[in-house]
Image (cartoon, coloured by chain):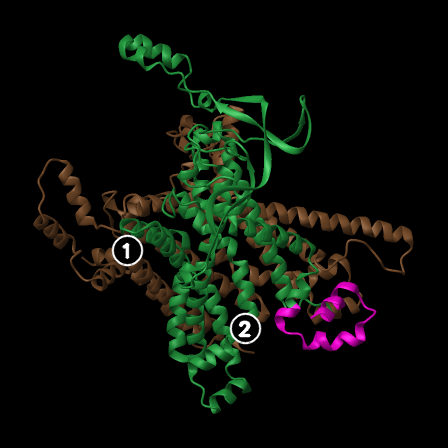
């Protein structure tokens, strides 16, 4: 009895105990007080998100009862409107939207139950399974890819932004001027080429890029890297009789680079713009001039002053970058034939009109973004003195 | 203004006498002057301007009517017709193209009717049904067709303001390029015989106009949310901003998708559908700009000029619209321009999934959608021309946006 009660309400207890713990710690620590505030704000935003998602899903045509009945109709039974209404009443769909929303939120906060998917005919948690984590990994890998390219080249781009192509300093000898000019124009050209390449990732729509790569494979006569595994490894377990299946891992990596590359490339352009704007912004500030006046120069000046200071706003935006990357994933998933949550989302939205499944996936994405925002805020407040000062006061 | 440009353009000799114009110049003039110094931005702006002009006056620049009326039934799936100045028959100052005719498919249906399965086998193995065989055409090198300028063709309206209530509809029937006999297909034709080049030109303006409508809607929704939230502050601010945050974390494209699915259930004409999609894209895109506006207004509303306006008896609306929002004007304009490519990409993604605009309308998304057809990928590569135009358009927008962002930043000026 007690065990059953706790099994049905475990999530609520976790949420409440974390909240109480933070509140307890926050009584005499300004920092934990801030963490507690952020925590409650995050929970509130999640509640609002669930409302927004729920309202949006109302616009999808049809409901579960109609779909059930339509299915029965194909089985040769004659269906009347009364049957549909009865089914609706049985599933609780005749209740007003607010009531349904409240019951959905209650189930979710009590035991992490995200409802029932009527096109899959099973609970949403089961239907999603590990697909959500797969999408999550795709997005994170794409983000890392984007950051790895965008951060160094964004800094380079900011470095060359106000530079001229040639060195015109009259104090340099002609040889020095020539050498400097070659260096500076190389930087300029490199910057321009990299910007072109990264913006090409933005301008080539994801689906076209994926299609082009697949086409290249077709023309080369190689097996296409679509899906997640090739046929030979699809049914091989990860941990077989002779230990870990390295062949499967190899095959897996040979397939997943495509979606990661495609969505990562388009994310790079935006990231590059952001890094560039942030570093340019910082490099014009007075403390950089002060450092320059003290004789700090070259890489030491850039790495120690403007770049270091522009990193934390970048970390801060990681949640919204995740949002942007996930945005592109569904269409790529359709083209490549992935079977992750994004593909499920697009199927639920545009083909089966499965409101609860779509709402659950959207909610989970929002959950990831909100928790990322929460953690980056909390960590930045702990390690970055500027952020600490602005959020905690003195 | 000229003095200002001279100062930025031609250097330092007349510095002292122009200093005043620099310090009194408005925000937009400063942005313009800074923008002119960005080479990549200026080049991109010229490319963009050309593309947009060609899109706006698409009927003039396109040699063939892009609708089904202009479709060439004898030249379906036709290859691009190249220009030449000389060949083995001699040189010509006026460029010319050859006469292209398609072979009629020689499918003997009579044999099929009487011959049973053997005849069907013979037909399929002869390759007459293969898609790549349907693309074959004959070039008649003896029959040159010379390119003409300002050719008379189908009538179109050059500028049509009758929609806006004005009685102004300038109609014309001249086209920039054309040939004397038949039609000129610079970039080939599609399955229906519609000219790909003309369709692409028409699609540019449709796509840009969707983006314009969407951005105007976005501007108003952000102004509403940001203005109200920032000006009134307090509880209204808290409520509006938490809703904004909630909308901001939900990925946008799935939401557009849900709305587009709902739209596809309704019985809308293509034009209504087009506006509905633009409005949806715009209306849901308010969080970022709305939030920035709110922050700006929160800091500005305690300034003396707002107090002065309040003491003069201005209403809240008047203060928001006439005093607070204009102080943020240049930022809003720049942000709008920067957002162009993203809105265009959103429209394209929707069309790609078949939920945005659909075929009789020439939007770039509709044309790009064809790229996923294996038949086109293998046999009609010229239908990838819209893709190239699209990439150019987006790149031009992004580079202009980049330069504008730098130019609009008041602190980017080196002291």
The chain letter for the residue carrying disc 2 is B
Q: Colour of chain B?
A: green
Q: Could you classify mark 1 by the number of other residues whose Cα lies within 10 Å: few (under 14), some (14-19), or many (20 or more)?
A: some
Residue B314 vertical position relative to residue B70 in the rendered view, above or below: below
- A330 on left or right of A313: left
What is the display colour for chain A? brown
Above or below, B343 against A45 in this view is above
State yes or no: residue A278 in magenta.
no
Span highlighted in magenta in the image: B1-30
Q: Residue B400, image x and y in percent? A: 60, 56
- Residue at left offset 67%, top offset 46%: A193
Q: Quadrant of the C terminus of chain B?
A: bottom right
- As rendered, which of B45 and A162 lies closer to the eye? B45
Q: Quadrant of residue B216?
A: bottom left
Picture coordinates of residue A265, whole percent (x, y): 55, 45
Q: Name the residue tied to disc 2.
A: B328
Residue plotted at (46% across, 41% down): B65
Residue under pointer 1: A59
Dividing the picture into quadrants, the one containing residue A306 is: bottom right
For label 2, the SS is helix
Towards the viewer: B194 or B329 = B194
In the rendered structure, find residue A180 and report the number of the disc placed on it. none
Q: Quadrant of the N terminus of chain B?
A: bottom right
Does dot 1 land on a helix, a strand or a loop? loop
Mark 1 → mark 2, Cα distance in angstroms: 35 Å
Residue nearer the viewer, A370 or B230: B230
Task: Return the x and y of residue A335 as percentages of the image width and height.
Answer: 43, 38
Residue, far right: A173
Magenta portion: prevailing SS class: helix
Query: Which dot, 1 or 2, sits closer to the camera?
Result: 2
Residue B169, image x, y percentages? 45, 56
């Amino acid at each position: 009895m007690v065990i059953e009660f706790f099994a049905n309400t475990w999530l609520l207890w976790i949420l409440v105990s974390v909240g109480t713990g933070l509140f307890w710690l926050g009584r005499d620590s300004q920092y934990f007080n801030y963490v507690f505030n952020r925590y409650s704000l995050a929970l509130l935003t999640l509640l609002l998100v669930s409302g927004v998602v729920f309202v949006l899903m109302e616009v999808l045509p049809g409901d579960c009862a109609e779909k059930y009945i339509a299915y029965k109709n194909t089985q040769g039974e004659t269906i009347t409107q009364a049957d549909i209404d009865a089914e609706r009443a049985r599933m609780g769909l005749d209740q007003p939207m607010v009531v349904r929303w409240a019951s959905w939120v209650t189930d979710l906060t009590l035991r992490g139950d995200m409802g029932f998917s009527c096109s899959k005919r099973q609970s949403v948690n089961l239907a999603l399974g590990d697909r959500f984590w797969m999408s999550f990994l795709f997005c994170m890998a794409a983000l890392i890819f984007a950051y790895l390219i965008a951060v160094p080249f964004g800094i380079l781009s900011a470095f060359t932004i106000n530079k001229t192509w040639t060195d015109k300093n009259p104090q340099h000898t002609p040889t020095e001027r020539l050498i400097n000019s070659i260096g500076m124009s190389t930087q300029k050209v490199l910057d321009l080429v990299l910007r072109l390449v990264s913006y090409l990732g933005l301008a080539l729509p994801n689906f076209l890029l994926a299609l082009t790569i697949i086409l290249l494979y077709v023309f080369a006569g190689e097996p296409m890297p679509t899906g997640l595994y090739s046929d030979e490894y699809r049914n091989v377990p990860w941990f077989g009789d002779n230990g870990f299946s390295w062949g499967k891992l190899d095959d897996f990596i040979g397939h997943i680079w495509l979606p990661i590359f495609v969505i990562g490339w388009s994310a790079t352009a935006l990231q590059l713009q952001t890094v560039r704007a942030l570093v340019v912004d910082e490099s014009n500030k007075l403390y950089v001039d002060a450092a320059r006046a003290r004789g700090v120069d070259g890489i030491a000046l850039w790495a120690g002053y403007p770049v270091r200071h522009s990193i934390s706003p970048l970390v801060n935006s990681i949640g919204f970058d995740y949002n942007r990357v996930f945005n592109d994933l569904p269409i790529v998933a359709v083209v490549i034939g992935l079977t992750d949550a994004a593909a499920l989302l697009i199927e639920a939205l545009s083909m089966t009109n499965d409101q609860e499944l779509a709402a659950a996936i959207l909610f989970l994405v929002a959950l990831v973004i909100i928790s990322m925002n929460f953690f980056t805020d909390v960590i930045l407040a702990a390690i970055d003195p500027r952020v600490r000062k602005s959020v905690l006061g003195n | 203004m000229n003095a200002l440009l001279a100062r930025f353009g031609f250097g330092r000799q007349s510095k002292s006498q122009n200093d005043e114009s620099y310090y009194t110049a408005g925000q937009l003039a400063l942005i313009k002057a800074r923008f002119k110094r960005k080479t990549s931005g200026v080049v991109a702006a010229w490319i963009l301007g050309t593309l947009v002009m060609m899109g706006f006056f698409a009927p003039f620049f396109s040699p063939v009517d892009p609708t089904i009326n202009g479709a060439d039934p004898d030249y379906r799936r036709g290859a691009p017709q190249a220009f030449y100045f000389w060949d083995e028959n001699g040189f010509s100052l006026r460029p010319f193209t050859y006469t292209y005719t398609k072979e009629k498919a020689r499918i003997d249906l009579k044999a099929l009717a009487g011959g049973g399965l053997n005849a069907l086998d013979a037909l399929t193995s002869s390759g007459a049904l293969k898609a790549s065989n349907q693309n074959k055409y004959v070039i008649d090198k003896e029959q040159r067709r010379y390119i003409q300028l300002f050719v008379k063709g189908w009538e179109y309206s050059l500028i049509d303001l009758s929609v806006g209530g004005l009685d102004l509809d300038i109609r014309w029937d001249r086209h920039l390029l054309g040939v004397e006999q038949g039609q000129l297909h610079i970039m080939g034709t599609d399955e229906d015989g519609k000219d790909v080049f003309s369709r692409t030109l028409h699609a540019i303006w449709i796509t840009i106009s969707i983006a314009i409508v969407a951005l105007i809607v976005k501007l108003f929704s952000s102004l509403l949310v940001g203005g109200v939230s920032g000006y009134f502050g307090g509880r209204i601010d808290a409520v509006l901003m938490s809703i904004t945050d909630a909308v901001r974390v939900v990925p946008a494209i799935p939401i557009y998708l849900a709305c587009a699915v709902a739209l596809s259930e309704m019985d809308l004409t293509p034009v209504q559908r087009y506006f509905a999609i633009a409005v949806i894209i715009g209306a849901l895109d308010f969080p970022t700009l709305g939030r920035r506006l709110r922050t700006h207004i929160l800091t500005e509303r305690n300034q003396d000029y707002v107090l002065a306006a309040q003491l003069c008896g201005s209403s809240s609306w008047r203060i928001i619209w006439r005093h607070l929002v204009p102080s943020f004007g240049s930022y809003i304009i720049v942000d709008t321009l920067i957002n162009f490519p993203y809105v265009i990409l959103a429209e394209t993604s929707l069309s790609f999934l078949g939920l945005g605009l659909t075929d009789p309308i020439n939007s770039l998304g509709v044309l790009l959608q064809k790229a996923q057809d294996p038949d086109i990928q293998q046999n009609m590569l010229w239908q990838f021309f819209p893709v190239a135009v699209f990439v150019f358009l987006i790149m031009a927008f992004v580079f202009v946006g980049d330069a504008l962002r730098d130019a609009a930043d008041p602190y980017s000026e080196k002291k």
